[in-house]
Amino acid sequence: MARTKPLTTQQETALWLLRHPAEYGRRLGYTLLRDALHGPWMEEIIWGIEDMTLQSHRGSYKTTCLAVSIVNIMLTQRGKNIIFLRKTDNDVAEVLQAVRAALLHPLTQAICQVLTGKPLELYLATNKKITTSLYSRAGGAPQLLGIGLGSSLTGKHADIIITDDIVNRLDRQSKAERERTKQIYQELQNLRNPGGRIINTGTPWHKEDAFTLMPAPMQYDCYTTGLLSKEQIEQLRMNMAPSLFAANYELKHIASEGALFTSVPKILRETDDLGNHRLRNGIAHIDAAYGGEDGTAFTLARKEGDTIYLYGRLWQSHVDTVLQTAIRLSKEYQCGPIYVELNADKGYLSREIRNHNYAAFGYTEDENKYIKISSYLRKWWKNIVIIQGTDPAYIDQILDYTDTAAHDDAPDSAASVCRILDRR
């Protein structure tokens, strides 16, 4: 039996680059790709077997990862063809131009020469189709075919189908567009060849959009990728509608129709430029959960002139499991007493707080919750300043609040402190 010829150092280097796609991408000029974040995304796109869905916030280089991964697939899986779909033909052309540039890059040319002994040639290169000299399938479909969702899919087939941002703002605004996108996505099942796979990337826009038909997503929101600083996140939050920020950066949906609160207040540090604590000598409030689907909301607040400084936490937990944390935060920020309702627990929580050697004030709630929130919290909302460290989920639940909202723990607690401070 003939012995396999050992790899040369050049071949080993070429293979190493292809097996480390983020490094390969950086050497192509995409210098912001990270091994720890983008490397696993690209490895799953290139070498995965099952269908996959990747959701990540805007500006996280999803599409860049796709372009580099497509080039990698064309270099290493030469018998496979790819269909690439985006919302419009112009969107498709943008990515195919990036793929073409990467194929012509001197590094890619050198890798191809080392691995095959031949230069990489482009037999076909337009804004919709690319076929290289590496493609081992004779005739038929191009190696890479780009399609906008408005184009016909009839008669097309592929080993790998990639969708990128086929769900966008139109799907949020139009039920007809959502249904059209979902119908096209279902049609893709008939386009893949036996043993083929479908890869999806994008951001969600509506709770009933086409992502509901896709495999459970790997999700990377703006708080987990490390690509955005806290200051950048807060600036983005302040400069766009709450529902838009939630969809594009937190990968979730909050209500926009009928919402009482449509903008995010200013968000500041705990201390001002002179070192004064904005919450010191304020009050605390707990909206307690004793089981079920409700959460425990905790609020610290202080009124200064026409401004209320507010800090909030939201836990999907029984109040007993988070009470010590709430008391610790009250001490840390020097806020007290802790106000609690007596209606549900007959004074249990206020006694527990006192047993932990902290001041509690129990009161009987006799005001309709919606009226309280729409009166006191809405009145003060434009003059509220959120203190950094507040749970994003706490803010989102307020922004999501309507008279039919499923959960109202955070707006209820925030409204309660506004009422207390207002009456003072």
Image (spheres, rainbow, N blue to C red):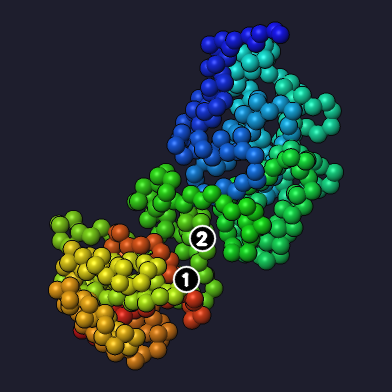
Quarter occupied by residue 324: bottom left
Image height of 392 relative to 292, above or below: above
- Quarter the C terminus occupies: bottom left
| Residue 32 appearing in the image | no
* Residue drawn 56% across the image and 10% down it: 8
Q: Left or right: where does residue 420 sit relative to residue 185? A: left
Depth order, front residue of 302/366: 366
Which part of the image, by quadrant, shows the N terminus?
Answer: top right
Quadrant in the picture for residue 376: bottom left
Mark 2 sits on what residue?
A: 252
- What secondary structure is found at the residue carrying circle 2? loop
- In the depicted structure, whether residue 414 falls above or below residue 395: below
State the CA–CA distance, disc 2 to disc 1. Answer: 11 Å
Q: Position of residue 381 (x, y in %)?
A: 35, 73
Q: Please give the label number shown on residue 400.
A: 1
Return the x and y of residue 394 as percentages of the image width and height.
Answer: 38, 67
Residue shown at 22% from the left, 69% from the top: 327
Q: Position of residue 303 (x, y in %)?
A: 22, 74
**Residue type at the position of mark 2:** Lys
* Element on which disc 1 rests: loop
Closest to the observer: 399 or 283?
283
Q: Does the rendering let one see residue 36?
A: yes
Q: Quadrant of residue 137?
A: top right
